Structures are given as C-alpha cells and as structure tokens.
Amino acid sequence: MMKSIVITTTINKRKHELEVHPNTTLLDLLRDELGLTGTKRGCEAGECGACTILMNGQAVNSCLVLAPQIDGQEILTIEGLADGDKLHPLQESFLDHDAVHCGFCTPGMLMSAKSLLDRNASPTELEVRTAISGNLCRCTGYQQIVDAVLETEPVKRET
Ligand code: FES
Ligand code: FES
C-alpha cells in the first residue's frame, strides 16, 4: 500500500495542509474529503467537463488530476466563485438567460467560462463555444449558455 503524502495548497483562497493518498484524484479529494460537492462527478474520464475547476486560472478536469499534483498550486472551485452572498456576474448572467436547467453541467460551465473571461474580456461567440467545448450539456442546447457568457457584464468581470 502506497504511503500518504502531505501537500500544501490553496483552495478557494484558503490555505490547506492535507494528507493525501497518491492515487486520489482531485475530484475525489474535493468532493469526498473536503465536502466541496459543487464540482460534479460525471464520466471520470475527461469527457464531460462536469468536474471542471480552475488550477492557477486554467480550466482543468479535476478527474484527471491526482491530488499530489496540486501541491503548491492555487485551486478555485464553484464554491469560491461567488463573493460571499454576492453572485459572480457570470452566475447572474446564467440566471438572467435561463442557462441553468437541471444544473449538472453548470459548475463546470461556469469555471470554463471564467477561465475564458479572465484572459479575454470580450470573446467572440466562436471563442465562447471553443472554451466550453469540453463541457457537455444534455438540457439547454447550449445557446442560452453561450448568450449568458457573451452578455456577462464586462465592467463587473474582475470581481
Ligand atoms: S467527470 Fe471529469 S470530465 Fe467527466
Ligand atoms: S443544464 Fe442539464 S446538463 Fe446542462
């Protein structure tokens, strides 16, 4: 049996020192050990995007990352997107555009969209579609999601 490893990481702006098993995925660490169940478990094979989080600002599938790989890294999950009681502008825009149906894809969609808007404040529709191309949605047909990202208020995007 492999030994546990101690890592230090920042998750949603809070420092953590964690003892992790080398084979634990980041998805399992977040959901099962830290109780951050907003990150969804879909295919566990890098195909659906439901588990998308940000690692140093990049959207990644947490089912494909092993827990030891986040040592020294900065992680943002859907729980860290809002500012206290104040929703992130992307979340407001998803509500305004009826872009949330069953909601299973929504956390991953939001994290992919945030990663895009943080590096490109005025994306084209093609850029939005490309950014969320790894996030599957079985409900919306995608148009409301694309519109929600395109129409997120630029002035508020930095919050
Ligand atoms: S659960 Fe990670 S990509 Fe599907
Ligand atoms: S809203 Fe149901 S999967 Fe996207």
Image: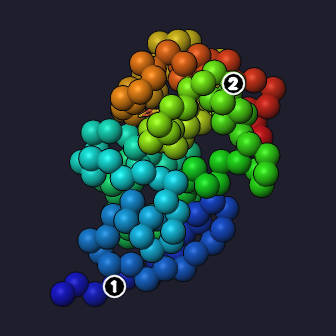
Q: How far across and down, in percent of the image, does residue 27 sit?
A: 39, 60
Please tell me which residue is depicted at 55% across the width and 32% down the height of the picture: 100
Task: Give the image quarter of residue 159.
Answer: top right
Q: Residue furthest left?
A: 1
Task: Give the image quarter of residue 115.
Answer: top right
Decide if ligand 2 comes within 8 Å of the CB at mark 2: no
Please tell me which residue is depicted at 62% across the width and 29% down the height of the picture: 94
Task: Give the image quarter of residue 155.
Answer: top right
Q: CA distance from mark 1 to mark 2?
A: 45 Å
Mark 1 element type? loop
Going by the image, does 112 lie left or right of 22? Answer: right
Q: Where on the image, by quarter, is ligand 2?
A: top left
Q: How far across and down, in percent of the image, does residue 44 sit?
A: 27, 51
Going by the image, does 12 lie left or right of 56? Answer: right
Please tell me which residue is depicted at 47% across the width and 37% down the height of the picture: 102
Q: How is the image coloured?
A: rainbow
Residue 115 in sight here: no
Q: Residue furthest front?
A: 102
The residue type indicated by label 2 comes to Asp
Q: How far across and down, in percent of the image, does residue 85 sit?
A: 79, 51
Q: Which mark is residue 148?
A: none
Going by the image, does 115 lie left or right of 19? Answer: right
Residue under label 2, please give it.
96
Residue under label 1, please give it.
4
